[in-house]
Image (cartoon, grey):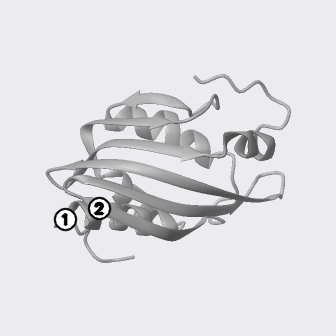
Amino acid sequence: MTAAADTTTPRAVVETFLKLMTTGDNDDRSKALELFAEDATLWIAGSLPFSGTRNGKAEIIEKVYSRAGGRMVPGSKSLWIRNIVAEGNQVVAEWTSRRTTLAGKDYQNDLCGVFEIENGKIKVMREYLDTLHAKTMQWPTEETKPA
């Protein structure tokens, strides 16, 4: 994806974020992560190593996106956006994530994200997913307490 990030509406910010994350391209992923505000908050359901609350863009990138990506075959990720609903600065999106684990297993999980957008940036994101399935596929033999 070579176009500049569309930040004209809260819905456009979330659509752009998800579409950039869909390509599997590292440059697009970097552009997507730039859509987080410097003081953003990300909460992910469950008790996986990347679950819990992360504060600030740097911590979100280091503790969530770098860690989760290290469990998958590079370039194997795809996202299918099922639904996006926006009201004011709040956006709710549903998507399916598919990729291949380092163990060679096909991984698919359905996710729901609740976003709050401020000044064209993701200020708050809450992400819900099937954490038992994620644990079974990505950490089958490890303890999975959040870091």
Q: Label 1 sits on what residue type? A: Thr
Q: Is residue 4 left or right of residue 76?
A: left
Instruction: Kindly state the secondary structure of the residue where label 2 is placed.
Output: strand
Residue 75: give x, y in percent of width and height: 62, 65
Question: From where the camera sits, is residue 25 visible?
Answer: no
**C-beta proximity under 8 Å, tags 1 and 2:** yes
Instruction: Kindly state the secondary structure of the residue where label 1 is placed.
Output: loop
Instruction: Identify the residue at horizontal 51%, vertical 28% (top origin).
Output: 52
Q: Quadrant of the N terminus?
A: bottom left
Tell me if residue 26 comes above or below residue 41 in the rendering: below
Q: Quadrant of the C terminus?
A: top right
Q: Nearer the viewer, residue 146 or 38?
A: 146
Classify 10 Å Cα crowding around label 2: few (below 14), some (14-19), many (20 and above): some
Instruction: Identify the residue at horizontal 30%, vertical 52% (top origin).
Output: 34
Q: Marks 1 and 2, how far apart in space?
A: 9 Å
Tell me if residue 123 comes above or below residue 91 in the rendering: above
The residue to which callout 2 is attached is 86
Tell me if residue 14 comes above or below residue 117 in the rendering: below
Instruction: Identify the residue at horizontal 82%, vertical 58% (top origin).
Output: 105
Lower position in the chain sequence, tag 1 or tag 2: 1
Label ID, residue 81:
none
Q: Nearer the viewer, residue 62 or 143?
A: 143
Classify 10 Å Cα crowding around label 1: few (below 14), some (14-19), many (20 and above): some
Q: Is residue 128 left or right of residue 17?
A: right
The residue to which callout 1 is attached is 9
Residue 11: give x, y in percent of width and height: 28, 64
Residue 138: give x, y in percent of width and height: 75, 44
Dot in front, 1 or 2: 2
Q: How many labels sit on residues?
A: 2
Residue 120 location, quadrant: bottom left
